[in-house]
Image: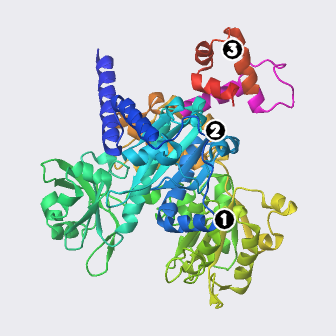
Amino acid sequence: MRNQSDQHARHDAGASIAHLVAAQLGTLPASADHIMIEQAHQRSAGYGIPRTAEPDFGSLGKGDLALLLEQNRVLHNHAAPVMEILYEQIINTHNVVVLTDINGLIIHTLGDADFLEKADRVALNPGVAWSEESKGTNAIGTAIAEKTPTIIHADQHYLEANRFLTCSAAPIFDVAGNVIGVLDVTGDQHNFHRHTMALVRMSAQMIENQLFASSFQDSIKLSFHSRPEFLGTLMEGIACFTPGGRFLSASRSGLFQLGLPISALQAHTFSSLFGLPISALLDHYRTAAPGLLDLCLHNGVRVYAKCSDLRLPGGSFQHTIDNTRGREPAAANALPTPSPGNEQKMRLSSLRYLNTGDEQVAVVIDKLKKVIGRDISILVTGETGTGKELLAQAIHNDSPRKDGPFVAVNCASIPETLIESELFGYEDGAFTGARKKGSIGKILQANGGSLFLDEIGDMPLNLQARLLRVLQERMVTPLGSTKSIPVNVALTCATNRNLREMIAKNLFRDDLYYRMNGLVVRLPPLRERTDLDVVIDKFLTAEGNGIRYTIAPDIMLLFREHTWPGNFRQLTNLLRTAMVMAGDDHEIRMEHLPDDFLEDVALIQIRTSKAVPENAVNSSATLEDVELSVIQKSLEAHSGNVSATARALGVSRNTIYRKIHP
């Protein structure tokens, strides 16, 4: 009976968390979906669009596309790193991640090469409009029209040509509550997965939170929630105040918890909302080890709260300290958790925090310590998600330039039409749509500090020549200018490509390669590291907010055997989700893990199973060939019954369909 009651308790806790997430992120109840889609179809018919019409392939010209990107520069800069993280979660699932502006014009895309070919058939390219007026009912256009997260699946699309798609879109709101764009994942209808919408909503919330934080950089930021374990997650509310305590703004989650519209909150102060004078808040953070605040909202609800990066009067700078553990916050000891954007500061302070017992990593760190501060360029290689930017930040923090700026540029995430102006800057009027007074550019922003060029292998050839000139002459000439400006930066580059092979194919300049590879180090993928247990333990400590989370022994065994194709990015995102799903249990078990991870584990077991006959495939077959062979033989054994095959192999029916109909 006790086990049964425990199961009910866990179910209720999970349901309450799901309800909280749905309420705060704006999930539509199932009963509203049908009505919303019917209304969208009525609007589409009103626009005079025939259901049999071919998709409109009309795209903006080069000049207008550059203007679109410039007009949405802030949105793009905050969204691009989040899109990469989102794409890592759905890679190789025949999907594309799409960012649009408020009018449904596509700004940026990331996708699997095989699906991008199909996407070309329906014009999922930058500069193409996906409003309802242009394409009829579709997730992007309908999300804009309804101002709510939207799924449009298969024949729910208005145009027949788009009915092979499944699309999940979430609007992105600015600090004033206005829709400024849409984040969308579009794929083949056969690959629909119920987790996709949750990932899209969470990613949109990440973008909004970053936009929010960048809009109120000099304010007092208070994070709060009725449950302390939600502090530091997307569920926390954030409210901003002037140093005198006047209310400025709140995030969407903050508005939800405060229970008041932004217009009503404008008349409030910190004291009237949280029942504490602003002076008492500042006094709290002047203590040696301030813990979480226990506050009472204006409506009587008690919340836990904390301030981070609080600038105290007199110029002193106070970081949040959690005295429940009697030491600095666990975040100071966190392990590689790639930042969703360059604007978010890395939490590690030096290379020594990255040394967690793996021999390969220890060798890398030892080499780096010998060259730091000696004007030697560093090239970091390794698979995506291995923590290359985190390492670059640690190199900067250990260098004599630690008080200077650290500027990171992802060469793969910036559109080719913008990367030149983004790196080198430009003068007023240098091109159509250029902002007044021009732009200083990333290289000059890093002057006196460190410049990190991630995915350097994706830099266009013509810009490689300009970068080489800058590195050799230590001078930068902005676009539209005849004046060269001296620049002094320490350079760290990173790539997951084989640059030597690219040089042989004339895709990368050999002179630039030899200029930037003073020291080449390789970060090993997670599957090669021997410190997985330490990594996981420190991450759980860092993210637990004082709560001790553990991993069930059978799950830890799965983790040790998994190949982790997404490396630390995949591991940290999985653990964050599992911690939330575990709730009050504090032990991560099988039921707390995402379905797609469990499917990957099952497929790996299929690939390595001793039950596979030696003659199932020939000696030159790939793992995918073996996998497909096993699935086909299992289908034959179960007379073509997909459900029975899925049960026998321990995967979902969608996985079977995806593998046999790529």
Spot occupied by residue 39 in the image (x, y as percentages of width and height): 38, 36
Q: Earlier in the sequence, mark 2 or mark 1?
A: 2
What residue do we see at 22% from left, 54% from top? Answer: 261
Graded by Cα atoms within 10 Å as few (under 14), some (14 to 19) or many (20 or more), the crowding at tag 3 reads some
Graded by Cα atoms within 10 Å as few (under 14), some (14 to 19) or many (20 or more), the crowding at tag 2 reads many
User: Could you tell me which secondary element the residue under label 1 belongs to?
Assistant: helix
Residue 295: image quadrant is bottom left
Spot occupied by residue 382 in the image (x, y as percentages of width and height): 69, 55
Q: On the image, numbered disc 2 is attached to which residue?
A: 94
Q: Is residue 637 left or right of residue 414?
A: right
Q: Nearer the viewer, mark 1 or mark 3?
A: 1
Question: What kind of residue is marked 3?
Answer: Leu
Question: What kind of residue is marked 2?
Answer: His
Q: Nearer the viewer, mark 2 or mark 3?
A: 2
What residue do we see at 78% from left, 61% from top? Answer: 499
Taking depth in this image into account, of 140 and 268 the one nearest to the observer is: 140
Q: What is the C-alpha distance between the residues marked 2 and 1?
A: 24 Å
Q: Earlier in the sequence, mark 2 or mark 3?
A: 2
Q: On the image, numbered disc 3 is attached to which residue?
A: 635
Q: What is the C-alpha distance between the residues marked 2 and 3?
A: 23 Å
**Which image quarter holds the N terminus?**
top left
Residue 376: image quadrant is bottom right
Q: Is residue 609 left or right of residue 42?
A: right
User: Could you tell me which secondary element the residue under label 2 belongs to?
Assistant: loop
Numbered range of the magenta stretch: 596-625
